[in-house]
Amino acid sequence: MAKASVAAKAAGTVKIKMIGSVIGCTEDQRATVRGLGLRRLQQVVERQDTPMVRGMIRKIPHLVAVVDQG
């Protein structure tokens, strides 16, 4: 169990900012934005830097931007 927590800390975090509106987007794109925890324009959230989160960011690059990797 300790190895899992060490791996999570080593993965780090990523800050994601919503830069585009979901008006006119598909339901799949809206669900991805909500899955990242974003609700409003210019909102910034911090998530674990995992392949799943990176894939979600790549799926909607026109709606989000990576602000900081830490």
Image (cartoon, rainbow, N blue to C red):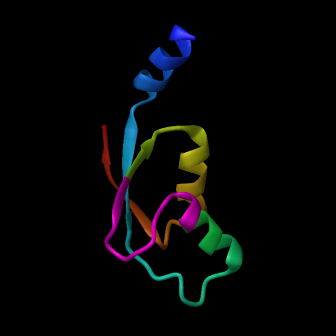
* In the image, residue 17 above or below residue 6: below
Is 64 positioned to the left or the right of 42 in the image? Answer: right
Instruction: For the N terminus, give its image quadrant.
Output: top right
Magenta residue check for 55? no
- Count of marks overlaid on the render: 0
**In the foreground, 49 or 35:** 35
* In the image, residue 61 above or below residue 27: above
Is 10 positioned to the left or the right of 31 in the image? Answer: left
Magenta residue check for 41? yes
Q: Give the range drawn in magenta.
A: 34-45
* In the image, residue 19 above or below residue 54: below
On the image, the x and y values in percent for residue 22 come to 53, 81
| Main secondary structure found in the magenta portion | loop
**In the foreground, 9 or 19:** 9
Residue appearing at x 55%, y 47% in the figure = 53
In which image quadrant can residue 67 be found? bottom left
On the image, the x and y values in percent for residue 70 come to 31, 37
* In the image, residue 55 above or below residue 70: below
On the image, the x and y values in percent for residue 6 come to 45, 15
On the image, the x and y values in percent for residue 52 come to 61, 44
Residue appearing at x 55%, y 66% in the figure = 34
Residue lying furthest bottom in this view? 24
